[in-house]
Image (spheres, rainbow, N blue to C red):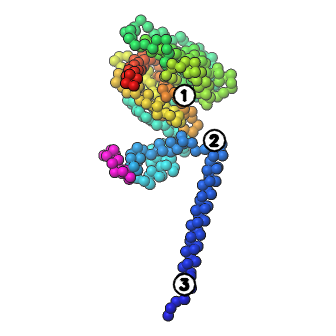
Amino acid sequence: MRRPNRFQKRVYLFSKHKLLMIISGFVAAFFAMFILVGILTSIDPNYRVASNTVKKWTNNVTEVHFLSLMMMENRMFKEALPEDQPPIDLWKVIFELGTNVRMHDVRSLLGRELPGFEMYDRQILIAGEGTDYTNLTVESTPPLDIVLEEREATPPEEKDEEKSVEKQEKTTGDRNVVFIYNTHNRESFLPYLPGTNDPNDAFHPEVNITNVSEQLAKDLNRYGIGAEVDNTDIGSILNKRGWDYSSDSYKASKEVVEAALTNNKDVNFVFDLHRDSIRKDLTTIDIDGKSYAKIMFVIGGDNPNYEKNYALAEKLHALFDEKYLGLSRGVEMYGGAGRNGVYNQDISENALTIEIGGVDNTMEELYNTTEAFAEVFSEYYWNAERVSGSNKEDK
C-alpha cells in the first residue's frame, strides 16, 4: 500500500527548520561580532587586549611548534626541524596557551599558588657559568625611609689610574655616546658600612653604586669612548614627590634619561647600573689571580621591543665569555604582574640594566670589573662602528 505524502511533508518541514536555524545562527554571530568589537574598542585602554599581550601568549609556543604548524602546509619546513625534537603535540599547545601553565615548568603553576615562589618565575635567556634559577638577581626594595636613613660610611679606596691602556687610535672625540645612570643610586656596599651587615640596610647617599658608574665612564674614556654619568639623587626626588621606592623609582629616573637623550643626540647606549643583594660567593670570581665582581644583564620582558635590548646583551655576554669566562652571570628576563618589566629599556634599543657585583663586593673588585667591561664594550663598539662605516661606503 502506498504511504501518504504526509511522510514527505514531514521531511520538508524538518529541512526548513534546519535552514532557519542556520540562518538565525549566522545572523546572531554576525551581530555578536560587531557587539564584541564595539566593546573591545570602547573599554578603557588599560583593559584592552594589546599586541604586547598577544605576544606574551605566543611566547609560550616554542619555535619548533611554529615550524610544525607551517610544515602542515609546506613540507619543506620539515628540513628546519631539529632531528631530536618530537612531533608537535597539538593538545599540549592548546592547553598551554589556554591556561598559561607550561607542563615542563612547575614554576608556571606554583608561582601563582605559593607565597614568595613568584621570585623564581623568571626566564633565563642566557645562563652564564654556574647560573640557574636558584641564584638569579635579588632586588632589595625596602621602604623609602630606610633608603634615605643616615648611616656612617668609610670612604672607598681610589683606583690607581697610572696603569692605562695604550693610546687609542679611534676616539669619539667630544661626543659622549654612552649615558650611564643609576635608578637606585643609593645602593651601597657592606664593606663600607660598619654599622650594619644587613643587605636591606646597604644604602648611602655618597658611597654607593654611583662610584662604580663614575669609574666605568673613566675606563670607557681610556678606550676612546665618550661617556656621560648622571648624578641625580633619585631617592630625594621620590621623597619630595611622596612616591614609593619600589614602584616609582623607574618613573623618576625615566625623566632623567629622556631629558639626557633630548639634550644629547650623540647618545646611542644607555646603561642603568645596579648592585645585587645576593652575597659574595655568588657575585665574585677570581680570574688569573685577580678578583672581580660578577655582572648580570637584566632584560625587561614587558618592553614590547625587548629583542633589540637582548641582542646587545647577548653580544656583550659572548665577548665576556671569550675574554673573562665566568665574569658574566648571563642574561635574565624579568617582568610580569606586580613588577616593573620595562626598566626604561623602551627609550632605546641599546638600553641595558646591568647588575654589577653585590652587597659584599669591594670597590677594588668592582673597579676591576668596570675595566673589563670597558675593554669588552670597546671591542664591540669599534667593530660595530667599522661595520657601520663599511655599509655607508657600500651605499
Rounded to the nearest angstrom, the CA distance separating label 1 from label 3 is 75 Å
Badge 3 amino acid: Phe
Disc sitting over residue 7 in the figure: 3
In the rendered image, the residue lying farthest to the front is 395
Q: Is residue 121 above or below residue 74?
A: above
Query: What's the residue at 64%, 28% (across, down)?
Result: 244
Rounded to the nearest angstrom, the CA distance separating label 3 from label 2 is 58 Å
Q: Compare marks 3 and 2 and give the one earlier in the sequence.
A: 3
Can residue 122 be seen from the camera position used here? yes
Which residue is identified by label 2?
45
In the rendered structure, which segment of residues is drawn in magenta? 71-87
Q: Is residue 289 above or below residue 303?
A: above
Disc sitting over residue 347 in the figure: 1
Q: Is residue 207 left or right of residue 378?
A: right
Q: Quadrant of residue 320?
A: top left
Q: Give the structural element (helix, strand or loop) at label 3.
A: helix
Judging depth in this view, the residue of 181 and 199 nearest the camera is: 181
Q: For residue 313: magenta?
A: no
Query: What's the residue at 43%, 30% (across, down)?
Result: 311
Instruction: Check if mark 3's residue and mark 2's residue have beta carbons within 8 Å.
Output: no
Circle 3 packing at 10 Å, graded few (<14), some (14-19), many (20+), is few
Query: What's the residue at 58%, 37% (across, down)?
Result: 338
Q: Quadrant of residue 187?
A: top right
Badge 1 amino acid: Ile
Rounded to the nearest angstrom, the CA distance separating label 2 from label 1 is 21 Å
Judging depth in this view, the residue of 143 and 343 nearest the camera is: 343
Give the percent coordinates (x, y) of residue 149. 63, 19
Circle 1 packing at 10 Å, graded few (<14), some (14-19), many (20+), is some
Q: Is residue 156 above or below residue 18?
A: above
How many numbered dots are placed on residues in this image?
3
